[in-house]
Image (spheres, coloured by chain):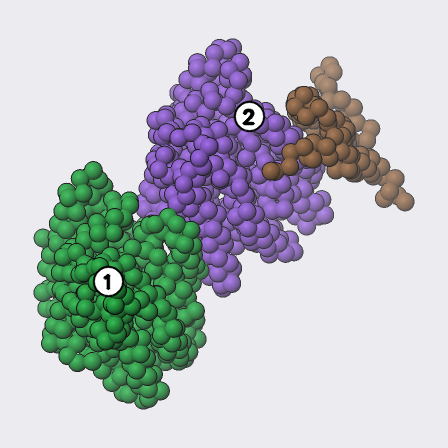
Amino acid sequence: MEFLVGHYNYWIFVFLMMLGFYVVVARGNLVKKIVGLNIFQASVFLLYISIGKVLGGTAPIIVDGGGPATYSNPLPHVLILTAIVVGVATTALGLSLVVRINEAYGTIEEDEISGMDKEP
Amino acid sequence: MIAAHYAALQVVAPLIAAPLCVLLRRGALAWLVTVAVSWIALAIAIQLLVQVMATGPVSYELGGWAAPWGIEYRVDSVNAFVLLIVSGISAVAAPYAHHTVVREIPEDRHYLFYSAYLLCLTGLLGITITGDAFNVFVFLEISSLSSYALISLGGERKALTAAYQYLVMGTIGATFFLIGVGLIYAMTGTLNMADIAARLDPVEHTRTVLAAFAFIIVGLGLKLALFPLHLWLPNAYAYAPSAVTVLLAATATKVAVYTMLRFVFTLFGADFALDVTFFAEFLIALALVGVFAASITAVFQNNVKRMLAYSSVAQVGYMMLGVGFFSVTGLTGGIVHLFNHALMKGALFMALGAVFYRLGSVRIEHMRGLGRQMPLTMFAFVLGGLSLIGLPLTVGFISKWYLILAALERGWWPIAGLILLSSLLAVAYVWRVVEAAYFRDPPPDRPRATEAPLALLVPTWILTLANFYFGIDTSVTVGVAADAARALLGEGG
Amino acid sequence: MTGGQTMVLAVLAPLAGAVAIAASHRHPNRREAATLVTAAALFALTASLLAPVMAGERPRAILWEIVPGISIGFEAEPLGMVFALVASFLWIVTSVYSIGYMRGHREENQTRFYVCFAIALSSAIGVAFAANMFTLFVFYEALTLSTYPLVTHHGTDEARRGGRTYLGLLLLTSIAFQLLAIVWTWAVAGTLDFAAGGILEGKASPALAGILLLLYVFGIGKAALMPFHRWLPAAMVAPTPVSALLHAVAVVKAGVFTVLKVTVYVFGIDLLADVHARDLLLYVAAFTIIAASLIAIREDNLKRRLAYSTVSQLSYIVLGAMLVTEASVIGSGIHIAMHAFGKITLFFCAGAILVAAHKTNVSDLDGIGRAMPITMCAFLVGALSVIGLPPLGGSWSKFLLALGAAGAGQYVFVGVLMLSTLLNVAYLLPPVVRAFFLPPPDADGRRISFSEAPPACLVSICVTAAGSVLLFFFADLLYVLLEPIAITTR
């Protein structure tokens, strides 16, 4: 029980990751796949942030010469800021591809699209 | 002086040139910039390789922040060689791009094409040169995002679905990789590769590190199209614009293979990887199944670009085989195959690009009788094909020689036999094209094709002849690869 | 000029010739002149090496190293001399014949034909003079690839199918088995250089040597040992000069030559004597000899019949190599030359019949001896030489092989050789008998509407037939030349 509750942040990460992954795999709608991909990525953001958190720690800001005794590791936050930017770019590119696919095929359902492109 | 900053310039030059292309807004000018930057990148890569071979690894502190805190660019014999491959291919592919781009892409998007091309180059060079694990992820995404865009520029609408599929799978791969890096960071508190390698020992047997290893291998496996994670590759290569196929086929998977080498051998260490139950056996099994499955699929493709794409999946199998042997000879074979495969696939896809330029199709039934109408292009294809098969005096032979030797060294002679049998499958698919092009009459409804323009032929033949040059004089390639293999296995060098 | 330079030139000369041929593709006369000049030059170059080699010299030329320890290099030794001399001399004759045949038959793509022919000859000479197994393999594969366009020359469905079998089988065996054996040899012995007495002695256990031997002998698909013999009949779709020079001489002899070379210089006669896999190969070779002869009897197509005869005759050489006695190894070496002259004569005659009478089947040959007496007499000479009757060259090699088999106490194989001689008679003499003693089918109605083949063909036929006779009287030269290869060290 201690193991389960004590690591609740990791359980959330695992749950979100699986959820996102499931959506990507199981949904045929191209937009929904992107949404799944987003959830998948967001779970990793949580993982990074929770790694850096020290219980009872504060932000590492130096006030009047002396810093706080315990502070959370700021580096994962910085890293994840980069990852979020990457995620946004991926989403944008993915969605714009979906728009183009819709223009070309008139649908964004995976099954219908693959049916339209059978090799002659 | 400027020589001290070569390592940074290697990445920064194409990075700056990319927005410049957008500002120029003229396709032709953007092309000139791309060619110039590619050549500069090649010159820098050669400089770096010479420097590394002469004086040992080069370390560069980005922004003057000392390593483990700042981002370090670190060039040793392994990645100096990969830098040479990437920039070398780009230096040949960029001049080649102009004609095919004019033919295949709407004019208002030319400058965007070159911009994305340069970003892709930036990403590939960045992954290779950096000594920081998180930085690898960033560059991985730079190259991936730009390659999704590049693939979607392909003429057919299937290019869009191919790009989308690649985007989804590529993002999953990159995210897996990111999880792995995060877990390593949690255990070691550092992102600098050399630092991680030093600090990983005490925590080596924790489950977290094992999980990190698994995530990173799977993530990179997706990026390098390790069977059965290769599903995105055939369509992506088949429907991308010709110049993009050349660049991606010759460099993208190679860089991913390099990254795997780096993580398995430098970060985790060969001992750790060998301790992981069945990792080596698993890798070899996947590689062999991949080689055969992909080669057999290739035999039945009617779109020749797709055929060669499946062949690329098979060739990645050879590289992984070299990794799986965990010996100097095996790694030498694997690493030298990085270079050699770049040469053969570069040459083959360039020849196909020239065919597409004239015919507007690369389907095998449309290529009938082409040997007479486009003799130089098709002969380059034949020679590239011979190299792919691995006949002596070509680069393909050199790679196979080392891989077979490595298998025999371990006493696994059935694997040596399988490697050779698989090259016969290459004979089967290459010969389908040869037969169609040389011993069949052209289809009556096809207008007579003429020889491709010189601007396409010259780069094609440069790479084709390189296939033979480096198959005969292997002192540079095998020398560097052996050096790199020893460095990775920690046996000096 | 040193011997080494001569060998390099001998390999380069046909390539230069190929360029000259391609350059003069608009002028058939100039093109054919280029072929003839090149062929003559090549023969002069190889012949100039004969005296030094007979004096015991071994000229060498190492050109460059591909990877450390593995180089492209040439060395002249007795076996290679025999092969190179036979191939280059018969190229001159075949060139003369081709001119008559290709023009008489109005073939297309003649330039491609002559270019590929020259490249194939360059490869054959490379095989003959190779100083190590790697160099030999390079030229062996080059020979396969350069002859492929010749097999598919006509571009018909049948030609393409034949070409596919040809290329498929030859590449299958060479890549899957031979290359494996080569890499393995390198891994075990640390060298691939041919050396008197072998390079595996003391390095490979008899069991490993057995595996290697099987890989080598089956890997050398050009030796046409069953079950990898089908490419040879398939190659018969090619124009006749190709079948004559390449598929009776250059290509197939490159195969058995490689077998001999591996036997003598890689394994060494002494080591091989201890290898049990040898027995298996002896029986495979014996089976091939008999089975191919039986198939030949049933083949009606003359060229295919000759092809199966070649399959059978090639196994004589493999048999001789595997018997590893002095007489049998030398007999094998001599058989390379003897069979070459006999079989090329037969193919020339088959081609002449095709050009003059447009007949390809044995059953159509009734009575054509009256219209083509010279051709059919030459056919008889060639047939008797292949059968092995004195006073024709083939008798010596067969005698030596039988002597070797008896010397080794393997009387079964003496029997095999005798039986095969009878079978040879059964499939080689009927065409002659039909030609001379049966009436032509249309004799009652009209007169036979054809006569002898073009003079260029006829001259070539006479030269090779005369060669078969001369070889009987000068076989001693070959014996003296080849004697050093069979010296044992024990």
Total tally of numbered discs in the picture: 2
The CA distance from mark 1 to mark 2 is 68 Å
**Residue nearer the viewer, C476 or B435:** B435
**Residue nearer the viewer, C105 or A23:** C105
Q: Is residue C199 visible?
A: no
Q: Amino acid at mark 1?
A: Arg
The single residue placed furthest to the front in the displayed view is: C445
Q: Is residue B232 visible?
A: yes
The single residue placed furthest to the right in the displayed view is: A1
Left or right: residue B89 compared with residue B325 = left
Q: Amino acid at mark 2?
A: Gly
Give the vertical position of C316 relative to A29 (above or below): below
- The chain containing the residue under callout 2 comes to B
| Chain A, hue in figure | brown
Give the vertical position of B123 relative to B187 (above or below): above
Left or right: residue B39 compared with residue C104 = right
**Residue nearer the viewer, C424 or B182:** C424
- Closer mark to the observer between disc 1 and disc 2: 1
Circle 1 sits on which residue? Answer: C446
Of the 4 image quadrants, the one containing the C terminus of chain C is: bottom left
Q: Residue at x 22, y 82 (%)?
A: C399
Residue B68, located in which quarter of the rendered image?
A: top right
Helix, strand or loop at mark 2: loop
| Chain B, hue in figure | purple
- The chain containing the residue under callout 1 comes to C
Left or right: residue B251 compared with residue B228 = left
Counting from the top left corner in percent of width and height, residue B243 is at 48, 28
Q: Residue at x 76, y 33 (%)?
A: A28
Chain ID, green in image: C
Q: Residue at x 24, y 85 (%)?
A: C403
CA neighbours of label 2 inside 10 A, class few (<14), some (14 to 19), many (20+): some
Circle 2 sits on which residue? Answer: B155
